[in-house]
Amino acid sequence: MSASETTTARVVAPDTEPAWKRVADDQMRRGAFTRTLPMWVGAFALLMVMPLLFPSAVGVTIMNQMGISIVFALSYNMLLGQGGMLSFGHAVYFGLGGFLSVHVMNYVEYDGWWLPLPLLPFLGGLFGLAFAIPIAGFSTRRAGTVFAMISLGVGELVAACSIIFVAFFGGEEGVSGDRTMGPPVFGSEFLSEVEVYYLTAVIVLISALFMYLFSRTPAGRMANAVRDNEERAEFVGYSQRYVRFVSFCAAGFFAGVAGGLFAINYEILTEENLNLVTSGWVLLMAFIGGVGFFIGPIVGAILLTLLQTVLSNHTELWQLYVGILFVLTVMYAPRGLTGLVMMHGPALRAGRLGMLAVPYAIAVVPLLALLAGTALLLEMGHTANQSVVGESEAHVFGLTLDVTTALPWVVAAVLAVGGGYGLYRIAQYLRDAFAQATGPAGGHQ
């Protein structure tokens, strides 16, 4: 037997491992779960009190949308963050799960099916899984560019089918349903948004918990190994294609769950829910939040939902700001916003986080000036380009600015240029301070 075969045999035959090592591994897994248990309890408590903190109908609707986006983004992270599979067609499983859920709603209403509403998202997940299995069969043979192009082709194919097969997809009008026609659950008929919120919150927490547990399984761990080095994963006895296949199918299931939640909340599905735009949106959520961390897609989903629902009410350029945020994240924070926070872990553990207070406080002034100046220039430029005769006022930050006069432009330019130059001048100071705070001895020899 060769050396490689001997190594493979040791890995795939766990009975040959020393007993102390198996005990240590079990203790490590139990310890990891024990450490995270308070966070899950805290998350549950927070979800339960959120409607009390934001009782308005708009606030509850936004929180429902956040919950849907969180499950969707976490399912995408199973592909990109854990398995290294860049997909441009993940919305397919989201949309298919949603369409099935709407049809089941109609069967419950018109054909007398008995199905409690809380089970509907899981049916959508099974439908997403049913389509993910055959697609994963041929798309996970290769990773990288090949996988990305296959996912793009599948996404465009299904989007085209949504216009052709009107009986299932409803054509351009989509398919609508009524969530209130099912049997009551604990006396609730889900007439109000608050009732739907609590249903969404429970399913979001369950889905997130199971996706986290999946990341701790051997399949989830090996997905990380295949992402980092396919050849080494093959060497220790794991099929890289099989590992990607399992991750792909799991991601398809939870994307279908998110689609079912969307159907419950909005009671309508259209072609837009499974096209390339939706696939690109979930990519933005996962990447901006941080695909290298489990909590990263959650952060991205919350942030982009707020940008889509709140910022869009104040400016027509909100999509431009999202695009700028994505470009800046790719250029300067490839590990996402969560990665920026986690970079300060060594300083926190060493008790030197306070060393960064003064440098960061100094950097806030030019940063805010740069952001304010850039936003003013963009908003005034948009107003000047779109305004008609007699309408030349831009409303930014509660200010009314006349774009036909020079003063607002000069002030905006000074803020943008001055803020950018200020950041450039203190960049080295910030790097030195960060190195001191995170170094092995606080930067002192």
Image: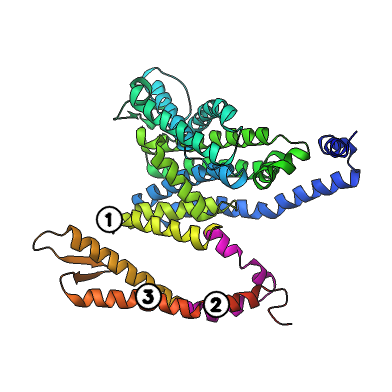
Q: Residue at x 51, y 63 (%)?
A: 332
Kindly report which numbered mark, 2 or 1, lies closer to the viewer in this rendering. 2
35 displayed left or right of 25 = left
Closer to the camera in the image, 194 or 249 = 249
Q: Is residue 98 above or below residue 358?
A: above
Inspect the image, locate mark 3, and give the three-letter code of the amino acid beneath it.
Answer: Ala
Q: Which image quadrant is residue 262 in?
A: top left
Q: Is residue 22 above or below residue 162?
A: below
Label 2 vs 1, first from the N-terminus:
1
Q: Residue at x 51, y 37 (%)?
A: 255
For label 3, the SS is helix
For label 1, the SS is loop
Image coords of residue 92 (percent x, y): 46, 33
95 displayed left or right of 373 = right
Closer to the camera in the image, 114 or 137 = 137
Q: Alpha-carbon neighbours of circle 3 within 10 Å: few (<14), some, or many (≥20)?
A: many
- Regarding residue 202, the answer to whether it shows in the image is no
Inspect the image, locate mark 2, and give the three-letter code of the amino acid beneath it.
Answer: Leu
Q: Is residue 358 magenta?
A: yes
Tell me the quadrant of the picture where the C terminus can be found.
bottom right
- Regarding residue 199, the answer to whether it shows in the image is yes
Q: Is residue 327 magenta?
A: no
Image coords of residue 111 (percent x, y): 39, 17
Tell me the magenta residue range. Answer: 337-363
Q: Which residue is mark 3?
A: 369
**Residue 316's disc number:** 1
Q: Residue furthest left?
A: 390
